[in-house]
Amino acid sequence: MYALFQLIGMVIDLYIWALIISAVMSWLVAFNVINMQNRFVYTVSDVLYRITEPALRPIRNILPAMGGLDLSPVVLILLLIFLRNLILVDVARWVLT
């Protein structure tokens, strides 16, 4: 049972990394550091968009517009860290005792 909680924690960690990489890639594309005409860059960016956008869209609808600043990845990362800690510490302790 503990292995299941560890797996859930790892999946949450991987999703957090996907959010960070997606945000950094969007900055690099916005400042023309990387070129979206490159097929590999486009594919990676598209995969990250498809993975992260369904979770970010509801948060963007709730947060007020702040010009060009998008805080939805930060909010989602904080929520995921809270969820991971809740699962790995509190729920795992309660279930395994």
Image (cartoon, helix red, strand yellow):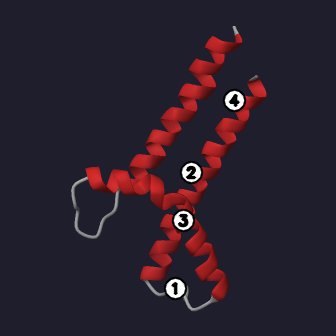
- Residue denoted by label 3: 50
Q: Is residue 93 above or below residue 74?
A: above
Q: Secondary structure at mark 3?
A: helix
- Dot in front, 4 or 1: 4
Q: Residue at x 47, y 87 (%)?
A: 32
Q: Can you say whether 89 is above or below 45 in the image? A: above
| Label 3–label 4 contact, CB within 8 A | no
Tell me the amino acid under the disc marked 4: Phe
Q: Are marks 1 and 3 in contact (CB under 8 Å)?
A: no
**Mark positioned earlier in the residue sequence (2 or 1):** 2
Look at mark 2 in the image and give the residue it sits on. Answer: 16
The amino acid marked with disc number 3 is Arg
Any part of residue 46 in sight = yes
- CA–CA distance in space, label 2 to label 1: 23 Å
Determine the residue positioned at 60% across, 22% down: 89
Rounded to the nearest angstrom, the CA distance separating label 3 from label 2 is: 14 Å
Horizontal and vertical percent position of residue 63: 26, 52
Mark 4 residue crowding within 10 angstroms, few (<14) / some (14–19) / many (20+): some
- Quadrant of the rendering where the N terminus is positioned: top right
Q: What's the mark number on residue 33?
A: 1
Lateral position of residue 83 relative to residue 5, left or right: left
Give the residue at mark 4: 5
Q: Mark 4 or mark 1, which has the lower sequence index?
A: 4
Q: Measure how far apart labels 1 and 3 are at the Cα level.
A: 22 Å
Q: Amino acid at mark 1?
A: Val
Q: For the residue labelled by badge 4, is the local secondary structure a helix, a strand or a loop?
A: helix
How much space separates mark 4 and mark 1, taking CA atoms? Answer: 39 Å
Answer yes or no: do the residues labelled 4 and 2 have beta carbons within 8 Å? no
